[in-house]
Image: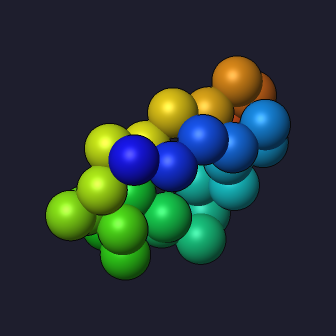
C-alpha cells in the first residue's frame, strides 16, 4: 500500500496506482 498526507484528486492518483491500497489524510479536488 501507499500512504500520503495530501492527495491531489485532479491528478487521479487512485487510477494510476489502482493495484495498491491508497490512504491519504487530506484530499484536494
In the figure, is residue 29 to the left or right of 2?
right
- The structure residue drawn at horizontal position 39% and vertical position 47%, both measured from the top left corner, is 1
Q: Residue furthest left?
A: 19
Q: Inspect this view and state whether residue 18 appears.
A: yes
- The image quadrant that residue 18 belongs to is bottom left
Q: Looking at the picture, does residue 16 appear above or below residue 25?
A: below
Q: Nearer the viewer, residue 2 or 28?
A: 2
Would residue 23 be found to the left or right of residue 3 on screen? left
Q: Nearer the viewer, residue 29 or 17?
A: 17
- Where residue 19 sits in the image (x, y, percent)? 21, 64
Count of marks, rendered view: 0
**What percent of the width, then of the height, locates residue 5?**
78, 37
The color scheme shown is rainbow
The quarter of the displayed image where residue 6 is located: top right
**Which residue does the image show at 51% across and 33% down from the upper left?**
23
Any part of residue 28 in sight? no
Q: Where the C terminus falls, by quadrant?
A: top right
**Residue 8 picture location, percent across and down:** 69, 55
Q: State whether residue 20 is above or below residue 6.
A: below
Residue at 74%, 28% (x, y): give it: 26
Residue lying at 69% horizontally and 43% vertically, measured from the top left: 4
- Please identify the residue farthest to the front as the structure is shown: 1
Amino acid at each position: 500500500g501507499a500512504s500520503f498526507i495530501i492527495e491531489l484528486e485532479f491528478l487521479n492518483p487512485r487510477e494510476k496506482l489502482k493495484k495498491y491500497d491508497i490512504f491519504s489524510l487530506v484530499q484536494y479536488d
